[in-house]
Amino acid sequence: MAEDTLSQRWERVRAGVAAACRQAGRDPSEVTILPVSKTHPVDVIEQALALGLQRLGENRVQEIRDKAAALPDRGIEWVVIGHLQTNKAKYVAQLAREVQSLDRLDLAEALQRRLDMEQRELDVLVQVKTSPEPSKYGLPPEDLLDFLEKIREFPCLHVRGLMTMAIQSDDETPVRACFRMLRELRDRAQAAGHDLPRLSMGMSGDFALAIDEGSTEVRIGTAIFGTRAAG
């Protein structure tokens, strides 16, 4: 049997997300798909571009640097979704359209400095840690409101919403709880005067649960691009 093409996988994911929206009683237009191209080579990115996928998620800034250099002037909107070190702020300020993993003040300060130098602005999502797993990053939930107030002082950063990674579990109850926590945190923050229309939550294995809990964007890698290359 021939291996599925990227085009076939993309259409299957689109259909799956639309079905999950309808199951949740939501309009499919309410949920955006962010294709996650991390670890996949430039020729695969070329295939994605041919399908009209211009907005791509990456975990590592080094990969964005390399791929952006190999694909200049292609209109790619690079989205940083992985844990970000402050010493990478320079390259993020130059190359990224958005960061979904803002989780601490020193990172915000580093990004603000570099963005000011580049005369650019950046959309950001605040990553909140809703899972007990030590491997997961994010701002402690109890610190969110205070953090959002402090981020108002950084004019180059535009907070558009929140992001989280759910616990990895075969039991949907704790997975759903992570997504519900983020939505409830967003609702409380909005009641406190913060405009946070976006909730980035849900990946290839759990996006249906995330959509049911209010996700506005799902980050899909393997289901679109196939098994990742090593690295």
Image (spheres, rainbow, N blue to C red):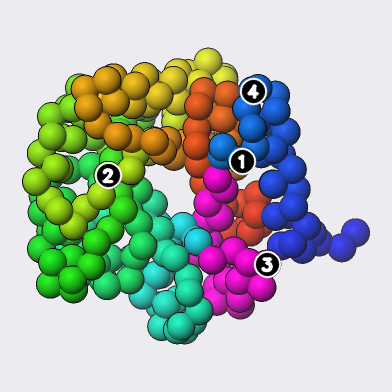
Question: Percent from the top left, x then y, of residue 209?
Answer: 58, 26
Q: Secondary structure at mark 4?
A: loop
Q: Amino acid at mark 3?
A: Leu
Residue pushed farthest top? 173
Residues under labels 4 and 2: Cα distance? 27 Å
Exactly how many numbered labels are in the figure? 4
Q: Which residue is mark 3?
A: 51
Q: Secondary structure at mark 2?
A: strand
Q: Which residue is mark 2?
A: 159
Is residue 37 rendered magenta in the image? yes
Q: Amino acid at mark 1?
A: Ser
Q: Secondary structure at mark 1?
A: helix
Q: Earlier in the sequence, mark 2 or mark 1?
A: 1
Residue 213 visible in the snapshot: yes
Q: Which residue is mark 1?
A: 29
Q: Are marks 2 and 1 in contact (CB under 8 Å)?
A: no
Residues under labels 3 and 1: Cα distance? 19 Å
Q: Earlier in the sequence, mark 2 or mark 3?
A: 3
Residues under labels 1 and 4: Cα distance? 13 Å
Q: Amino acid at mark 4?
A: Ala
Nearer the viewer's eye, disc 1 or disc 4?
1
In the figure, residue 120 lies in which quadrant? bottom left
Q: Is residue 5 above or below residue 221?
A: below
Q: Amino acid at mark 2?
A: Val
Question: Percent from the top left, x then y, of residue 231?
Answer: 46, 63
Q: For this rendering, which residue is in front, 23 or 139?
A: 23
Give, as a single range, the part of the protein colored magenta.
Answer: 32-54
Question: Percent from the top left, x then y, of residue 193?
Answer: 22, 27
Q: Earlier in the sequence, mark 1 or mark 4?
A: 4
Q: Which mark is residue 40?
A: none
Q: Which residue is mark 4?
A: 24
